[in-house]
Amino acid sequence: MFSDTHYSAPKMLAPLMLAAFAGHVQADFRVMPYVQNPSPTAMTIMWFSDDAKVGTLSVAGIGSYLSTPVIAADLAYHANEIENHFQGTDPGAPYLHRVRVEDLQPGSHYSYQVYQDGETFQAAFRTAPEYHQAVRFIVYADSETEPESTGKTRRWSQPYGDWDRQYHVDQTEGYHQNLKVMQSRHPDFIAIAGDLVESGNEQRDWDEFWYHNAGSYGTLAS
């Protein structure tokens, strides 16, 4: 879960309150909705869109909220990325949507829907428990996502031996399977120490991270 005040190339994830379920990935979202900054009585929901159209967040039993889109200029693609990977056509920087939902109950599940430019995404979150309650959490590091790792496996050493074999899966599939295991454990939050991506100055590497966590590969962060 990224900081609620900084939306570019973060170095560390804050605690992530996991979704109970998630809807289908929709093309009009640059990044699917995901949850941030949990407290016993509040939660922040964020997402990115390709244009500046206002989105609507509806939380069951609580109410509806309109977003205020803000251009995320720090997430623009580098000129080399545009030339080499987008045939010279700049996809443009996305728009950030951030909504803080308050007056919630501690340790409670809430279903929510986000409507953005004709598309709908739905998921659920759980608020933080009251203080002094037990929690289950997962901490990991070095996801180091990058598109170039797809389809390429790494050399894998024998125990106390030579590097004469290749690992069974590539980084993309390996990270995907690790996230599935994490989700199956139903933790209350997840923290990532870094490195989140391979090259922090390449936006495509950040896109790859979000494809796994709030996109077409998976929606664990939602």
Image: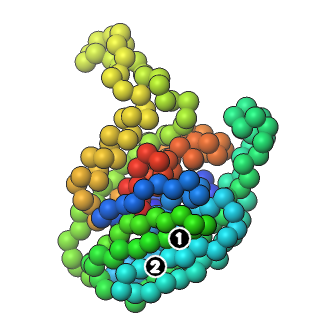
Q: Is residue 63 above or below residue 124?
A: below
Q: Position of residue 73 (x, y in %)?
A: 73, 59
Q: Is residue 195 above or below residue 138?
A: above
Q: Amino acid at mark 2?
A: Ser
Q: Position of residue 149 (x, y in %)?
A: 50, 30
Near mark 2 (Cα within 10 A), the count class, few <14, some 14-19 or many ≥20, is some
Residue positioned 41% across, 28% down in the render = 170
Q: Amino acid at mark 1?
A: Tyr
Report the front residue among 62 and 194: 62
Quarter of the image with the C terminus in it: bottom left
Report the front residue among 139 and 188: 188
Residue positioned 29% across, 12% down in the render = 161
Farthest residue to the bottom: give it: 103
Examine the rendering and report whether any part of residue 64 can be seen: yes
Q: Would residue 100 appear left or right of 54 to someone viewing this image?
A: left
Residue 158 is labelled as none
Q: Which residue is mark 1?
A: 115
Q: Is residue 220 above or below residue 179?
A: below
Q: Are marks 2 and 1 in contact (CB under 8 Å)?
A: yes
Q: Position of residue 207 (x, y in %)?
A: 57, 47
- Tag 1, which secondary structure? strand
Residue 58 is labelled as 2
Examine the rendering and report whether any part of residue 3 can be seen: no
Residue positioned 24% across, 63% down in the render = 136
How many labels were placed on the picture?
2
Q: Would residue 136 appear left or right of 126 to someone viewing this image?
A: left
Q: Is residue 101 above or below residue 122?
A: below
First in residue order: circle 2 vs circle 1? 2
For marks 2 and 1, give the CA distance: 8 Å
Quarter of the image with the N terminus in it: bottom left
